[in-house]
Amino acid sequence: AQKVTQAQTEISVVEKEDVTLDCVYETRDTTYYLFWYKQPPSGELVFLIRRNSFDEQNEISGRYSWNFQKSTSSFNFTITASQVVDSAVYFCALRRTNDYKLSFGAGTTVTVRA
Amino acid sequence: GAVVSQHPSRVICKSGTSVKIECRSLDFQATTMFWYRQFPKQSLMLMATSNEGSKATYEQGVEKDKFLINHASLTLSTLTVTSAHPEDSSFYICSARGWAGREGMNTEAFFGQGTRLTVV
């Protein structure tokens, strides 16, 4: 069974602060994919990143960075110098290599105050 | 990039009526579409998986007779909530999987805009 845990329910920061969202997953598969999505108040899901379990390199995209550690089954997400527009619910998700269904974490609500 | 369009974005219906939600892949052929449901302040839960031309596969606990899914073409899947009741009020969102573009970009990661259903 696949399980994704996002222990942080809500995080509130002041603009320009960094914020790190934790994601811990459980799977019996040796290969799998991990995802992060952003859900702004409007509701749509915005794809941020997909990571293959074979690729443990950390990734940076602008103010976003991801830290994948297979040894601890974690795929954490950091927003650097947060902005008000970053306010949203962020979901971590997992899927098996040969099955395209996604298992989502509970989500973390990030509020960035001006 | 690959685009998935969902319609309507919001719908309010009376209890006992049926509502149809459409999910379209605009620039690629969607061999598989997924329907998720999200209750307020909760996560997304998969309801069913539909493959073009075949019956949908429903997750445990989802009533197939209540949530009718049709995936008759490679660009369109529909979810019909039959005899809707207030407890069906939720955010329904689809995603589509297929291949797009010359480089065969995997489109699995893209979702529609979602449909907020309110049953009164």
Image (tube, rainbow, N blue to C red):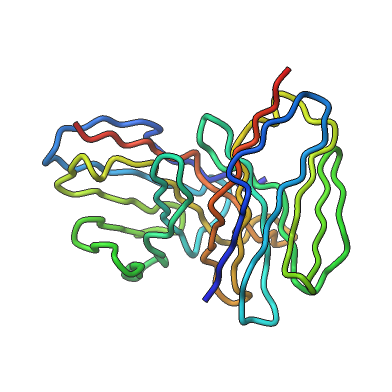
Q: Where is residue A76 in the image (x, y as percent from the top left)?
A: 75, 55
Number of numbered tags placed on the structure image:
0
Q: Where is residue A2 in the image (x, y as percent from the top left)?
A: 55, 72
- In the displayed structure, B4 sits above or below A87; it is below
- In the displayed structure, A22 sits above or below B17; it is below
Q: Position of residue B16 (x, y in %)?
A: 11, 41
- Location of residue B85 (image quadrant): top left
Is residue A107 or residue A101 the one in the foreground? Answer: A107
- Location of residue B87 (image quadrant): top left
Q: Residue at (44%, 46%) from the top-left corner?
A: B93
- Residue A62 located left or right of residue B62: right
- Location of residue B97 (image quadrant): bottom right
The furthest residue to the left: B16
Q: Residue at (56%, 67%) from the top-left corner?
A: A3
Q: Where is residue A17 in the image (x, y as percent from the top left)?
A: 82, 30
- In the displayed structure, B102 sits above or below B5; it is below
- Residue B60 located left or right of residue A44: left
